[in-house]
Amino acid sequence: MKSQDITYVDKLNELRLDMSHPNSNGKIFILLEGDTDIRLFRKFFNLQNCKVEKIPGGNPKVESAVAELLTIYELIIGIRDADFIHLRTIPYSKPNIFLTDFHDMEMSLVSENHTFSTIVFEFTDSPVEQHNSIRENIIKSIEQISFLKWLNEIENLDIVFDKTGFLDLISFTNFSMNFEQYFNRLMSKSPIAKITDFNTIVAKIEDLKTKNPNIYQLCNGHDFIKAFTQYLKLNGKLKSSNDDLISSIFRIKYSTENFQQTNLFTLTKHWGDSNNCIIHV
């Protein structure tokens, strides 16, 4: 069976069998959301002691899998993207679930100065003094999208974002975008959206801006990397808009030492120490 054909139930059954096998006694199971997470986190965890596994179905399924499997096996944790959780007023608490420091793991990579600068140096002639401005401008270019996604979650607006392009709407000269045209594209794919009036949406976004959220908690890493890749193509030496390539380079350049500076590392290490487990390399 191909990996993309494995369902959540298939994976849960597979893990139940694995956990019941004598060879798994004392092993730590680390459940993640996607293939890119697997490729990144495998270099941070001790693979002699740990099994790093992908759970199909996104973050909610990671939470569900950990909750279900904890009934039969104790040495199991899940790591999920925080999304907008850190922006909530109510603290997040689910047994054995750990959150990324920022919106998602991509934004954790983007926030690390040396990692980001390495990529800018690779594809542009920009001096290091300009690198933070480049990052801030990319975030600025997708800011309205980020706020709209946050608003969509807060108010359950049923706006569908999947497969709606926006790169052609961004000016990489002044880092602005035609947000109204993007919103119209979304509405054409969101038949049950609860708010369809553009001016109402803009007013609600402006109200959200007064909360002054941490931009790394707000911004979606996939959106950032798409916009950043386009910037490198238009203003640098990247020959094609290959955001998978840029994502891969971010993962390669982000080191174990970088990870050790995160809250995620501290919290998972504390869990391992509490359970007499060595989970990190």
Image (cartoon, rainbow, N blue to C red):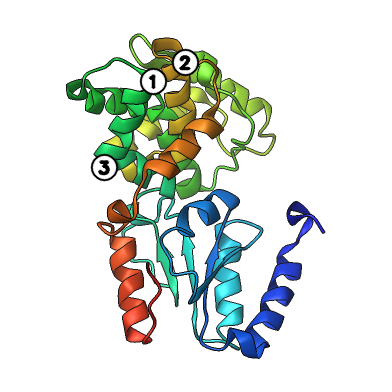
Q: Amino acid at mark 1?
A: Phe
The residue sitting at the top extreme is 173
Q: Residue 277 location in percent, x, y?
A: 39, 82
Which quadrant, please, contains the C terminus?
bottom left
Camera sees residue 104: no
What secondary structure is found at the residue carrying circle 1?
helix
Q: Residue 107 location in percent, x, y?
A: 38, 43
What secondary structure is found at the residue carrying circle 3?
loop
Q: Which mark is residue 233?
A: 2
Which quadrant, please, contains the N terminus?
bottom right
Q: Residue 158 location in percent, x, y?
A: 60, 43
Which residue matches tag 3? 211
Residue 246 left/right relative to 25: left
* Mark closer to the chain start, 3 or 1: 1
From the viewer's side, name the closer residue of 39 and 89.
Answer: 39
Crowding at dot 2, Cα within 10 Å, few <14 / some 14-19 / many 20+, comes out as some
| Alpha carbon distance from label 2 to label 1 | 9 Å
The correct choice, above or below, for 243 with respect to 268 in the image is: above
Q: Are marks 3 and 2 in contact (CB under 8 Å)?
A: no
Q: Amino acid at mark 2?
A: Lys
Which residue matches tag 1? 123
